[in-house]
Image (cartoon, rainbow, N blue to C red):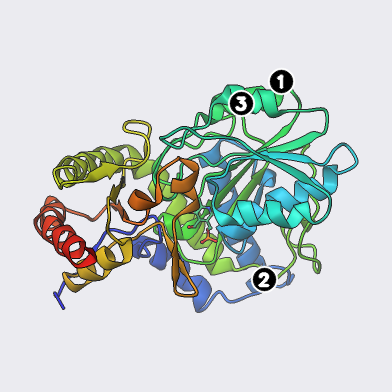
Amino acid sequence: MPERIIYLDHAATTALDRRVLEAMMPYLTTEYGNASSIYTLGRHAMQAIDHSREQVAELLNCRAAEIAFVGCGSESDNLALKGLAFAAQKKGKHIITTPIEHHAVLHTCHYLERFGFQTTYLPVDEYGRVNPEDVERAITDETILVSVMYANNEVGTIQPIAEIGRICRAHKVAFHVDAVQAGGLLPLDVHALNVDMLSLSAHKFYGPKGVGILYVRQGVRILPQLQGGSQERGRRAGTENVAGIVGAATAFELAQREFPQAVERMQALRDRLIEGVLRIPDARLTGHPTERLANNASFCFRGVEGESILLSLDMHGIAASTGSACTSGVVDPSHVLVAMGISDEWSRGSLRLTLGKDNTEEDVEKVLTVLPEIVEKVRSLAL
Ligand SMILES: Cc1ncc(COP(=O)(O)O)c(C=O)c1O
């Protein structure tokens, strides 16, 4: 096994930034109070949460009261969708989303369908882009919610969020955006984006795992999905994860402040990766050629299994990902690639390389050295 891991799976998770760990440490050690307690130790915890909420609000250009801290990105999506659907069901039971959302949104829609909600899954083009006109056409008198992700986790395609938001607002329909892949990579001003609800997850931008953020615009009513105490202004019961919240806010601040420079660097590495990988025979880029995340280089190789490529890359110390999921021994092609109209023959050989702030040119060159041989070998074995 090579000594240093070349980590190219930042869409899956990221390493905790040292500065974030330092900010969290007091709340994991000496400042252990429960934020609901009225004595000094408790008040310190509450002050740290209040400060974190203000920090996040400032970065999103919203009010602190509009921010709720939750347990992960999936919970943030769940709370937005179920919370709004159950609160607005007297008005209507129609939800609009896309077939390329993360399962945290798709499975929540399936769950809501069991309670009589109907979902329209908008088409996407070959690059995974939604046409805002399709959103407008799908809205009916029954529509209460539109949920479209900012950027896709598999292929990196960025959606025209501000435009979709404008349409939703004109029709008085709530608009939720899963921005989990956008933290530290895209601008996140909720007013410029015309969104009513927005979800983030700290572990995607060098923060701790197990902390999600939900922005809910003032005036948008959601029903809590966890019953218990009145934490998070009654939106989410449970003793606050103070260290996690402080870590999430610190990481978000660092990520959003540093993102213009980080994006410029990653984009150059991404473009080099794309250019090099596309020289491999029967390789194609997946996702939009330009409207894509600065750190995402994703591909399909015809006639190979993505898992075999991953295992071979792992032997070279390279950590990457494939979109397909292995369920009971059968490899299912990714729902994202299927929705984009990519055939089985190609979609089974998907590979996602997602860069981070510490990747170097050497990392990219190493991938470009070993990958062509790996694909050739895996392909010859599959014949
Ligand atoms: C687009 C998107 N939404 C939601 C999630 C879920 O976030 P979490 O892992 O924090 O539950 C992910 C995680 O991969 C994601 O990529």
Q: Residues within 10 Å of mark 1 (few under 14, many from 20)?
A: few
Q: Which residue occupies 74% across, 70% down?
A: 38
Q: Position of residue 366 (x, y in %)?
A: 11, 58
Q: Which residue occupies 58% across, 39% down?
A: 148
Please give left or right for residue 327 compared with residue 176 in the image.
left
Q: Which residue is mark 1?
A: 170
Q: Which residue occupies 50% across, 37% down?
A: 188
Label 2 CB less than 8 angstroms from ligand 1: no
Label 3 CB less than 8 angstroms from ligand 1: no
Q: Earlier in the sequence, mark 1 or mark 3?
A: 3
Circle on res. 317 = none
Q: What amino acid type should be assigned to the residue bearing mark 3? A: Asp
Q: Position of residue 287 (x, y in %)?
A: 37, 39
Q: Which residue is mark 3?
A: 134
Q: Residues within 10 Å of mark 3 (few under 14, many from 20)?
A: few
Q: What amino acid type should be assigned to the residue bearing mark 1? A: Ala
Instruction: Identify which residue, 146 or 111, lies in the foreground.
Output: 111
Instruction: Identify which residue, 381 or 340, lies in the foreground.
Output: 381
User: How many angstroms separate mark 2 from mark 1 (CA)?
Assistant: 44 Å
Q: Nearer the viewer, mark 2 or mark 1?
A: 1
User: How many angstroms separate mark 1 from mark 3 (CA)?
Assistant: 15 Å
